[in-house]
Amino acid sequence: MRRFGLLAILCITIIVLSFSGCTDSSPATITPTPAPSSSAAEIGHSSSNPAPIGQAVTGNSRQKMEDGSQLTLTMVLENVTRGDMATKMLDNYSGLPQVPGRGNEFLFAEFRADLVNFTPNETYSISNLNFVILSEGNFTNATPVILFNPTIQGGLMKGETREGWVLFEIPANSTDPVIAYARGSDGSGGLWFRAY
């Protein structure tokens, strides 16, 4: 019964997203922008040196926009909630009891995204599907089923900020999960954050 409720929410989410009107559902791969100091330049630029909770990471797209400039996005992981507390949050939001898979737990990550530079009068779309978590040596996509309110997913125009949550399901014994946003299909690039 619990899985049925999750499946129903997935179907509703897919229908809503298909009619959402965002201009682009998959952002370009983001390449981190080096910070001024050499020690800070490495933080948030790879899975081996992710940014701690509360530290901003800025990156640019690899592709140039029509005017020759690059997309510039700054993102901060503001909060992480996991385990029983995350399950309670999900239960309260969905109205249905939720159970992670055997040996797993839910992890909510709250992000803030600032779109520093983008094509004027165009919308840049942030999708939950562009977040992955590296836990116990395995990459797992964010759970697209639940659009916890507020969700990070949605559109931004140049100069705008968006805050919201992303949901993952990870092994309960995971001690050092790391989250990436907009990494390339080859695993390069992206903005990296410590979720512990």
Image (spheres, rainbow, N blue to C red):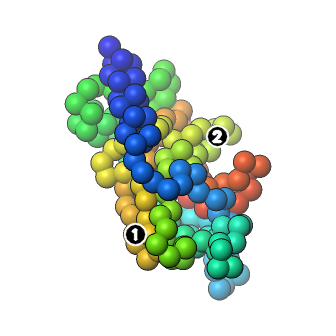
Are there few (<14), some (14-19), or many (20+) residues within 10 Å of tag 2?
A: some
Q: Is residue 22 visible?
A: yes
Whether tag 1 and tag 2 are in contact, CB under 8 A, the answer is no
As helix, strand or loop, the secondary structure at mark 1 comes to: strand
Which quarter of the rendering shows the N terminus? top left
Along the line of sight, the residue nearer the viewer: 27 or 18? 18
Q: Looking at the picture, how far across and down is residue 42, in whole percent?
A: 69, 71
Apparent side of residue 186 relative to residue 95 in the rendered image (left or right): right
Residue where numbered disc 2 is placed: 139
Q: Which quadrant of the view contains residue 49?
A: bottom right
As helix, strand or loop, the secondary structure at mark 2 comes to: strand
* Residue type at the position of mark 2: Phe
Q: CA distance from mark 1 to mark 2?
A: 27 Å
Q: Residue at x 50, y 62 (%)?
A: 124
Extreme-right residue of the structure = 186
Q: Residue at x 62, y 65 (%)?
A: 44
Q: Which of the two marks, 1 or 2, is nearer to us in this view?
A: 1
Q: Which quadrant of the view contains residue 160?
A: bottom left
Q: Which mark is residue 161?
A: 1
* Residue type at the position of mark 1: Thr
Rendered position, 35 above or below 167? below
Q: Looking at the picture, how far across and down is residue 140, in whole percent?
A: 59, 38
Along the line of sight, the residue nearer the viewer: 15 or 50? 15
